[in-house]
Image (tube, rainbow, N blue to C red):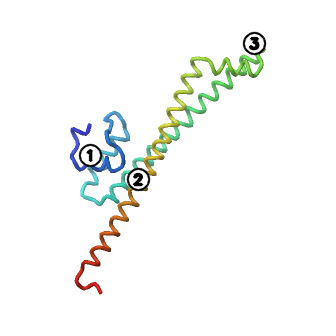
Amino acid sequence: MTDTLSPEIVERLRDIGLDTPDPNDQLHRKLVATLYRTQGLSLGAQIVAMKFDFNWELRSAGEVFARAKTDYEHFIDKKKAELMLGDGHSGVKAAAIANGSDEAYRLLLTYRLAEQRERAIRKFLDTLDNRVEVWRSENANERRADAYSHPDHA
């Protein structure tokens, strides 16, 4: 995807740790669109705009995560109840059978992947916050240097 992007967009994506944007990832496509839309604005303004994209994606990822976790837990609880009530298995044996099923594996994997996506988005938001702080410091340092280099500085 970086082959088709302008160098400025690639540089800005790298500023936030996204070295290889995936054209199949909706968030990456949103970020690229946001950067094109905000081209020419300050780094701070662009980062704030990208944070909106991340926040909406975090909301969506949270819903997917909650649904996946609930689906997994519901499956395990239902399977355990069926095994305990129907076959008379102990709770420990019913839990082992339920957790060992292929369906439990599939649901647990979906749940963990959703959890990881949500965690990754939160870390990206932290990275954006850190990048804004660095940008602010750089701007303050430049203003200070300009003030000292000005001939009227006393």
Which comes before the other along the chain, label 3 or label 2?
Answer: 3
Figure quadrant of the C terminus: bottom left
Disc 2: which residue: 128
**Separation of disc 3 and disc 2 at Cα?**
54 Å
Disc 3: which residue: 87
- Expressed as whole percent of the image width and height from the top left, the position of residue 88 reads 78, 14
Q: Amino acid at mark 3?
A: Asp
| Front tag of 3 and 2 | 2
- Expressed as whole percent of the image width and height from the top left, the position of residue 115 reads 53, 37
The residue lying toward the viewer, choosing from 76 and 67, is: 76
- The residue lying at 74 percent from left, 22 percent from top is 92
Vertical comparison of 149 with 122: above or below: below
- Expressed as whole percent of the image width and height from the top left, the position of residue 93 reads 73, 18
The residue lying toward the viewer, choosing from 105 and 58, is: 105
- The residue lying at 26 percent from left, 37 percent from top is 1
Q: Is residue 29 left or right of residue 130?
A: left
Which quarter of the figure has residue 105? top right
- The residue lying at 35 percent from left, 69 percent from top is 140
Q: Which mark is residue 45?
A: none
Q: Residues within 10 Å of mark 1 (few under 14, many from 20)?
A: many
Q: Amino acid at mark 2?
A: Leu
Q: Residues within 10 Å of mark 2 (few under 14, many from 20)?
A: many
Q: Secondary structure at mark 1?
A: helix
Outermost residue, top direction? 87
Q: Secondary structure at mark 3?
A: loop
The residue lying toward the viewer, choosing from 68 and 8, is: 8
Vertical comparison of 154 with 127: above or below: below
Which comes before the other along the chain, label 1 or label 3?
Answer: 1
Vertical comparison of 87 with 139: above or below: above
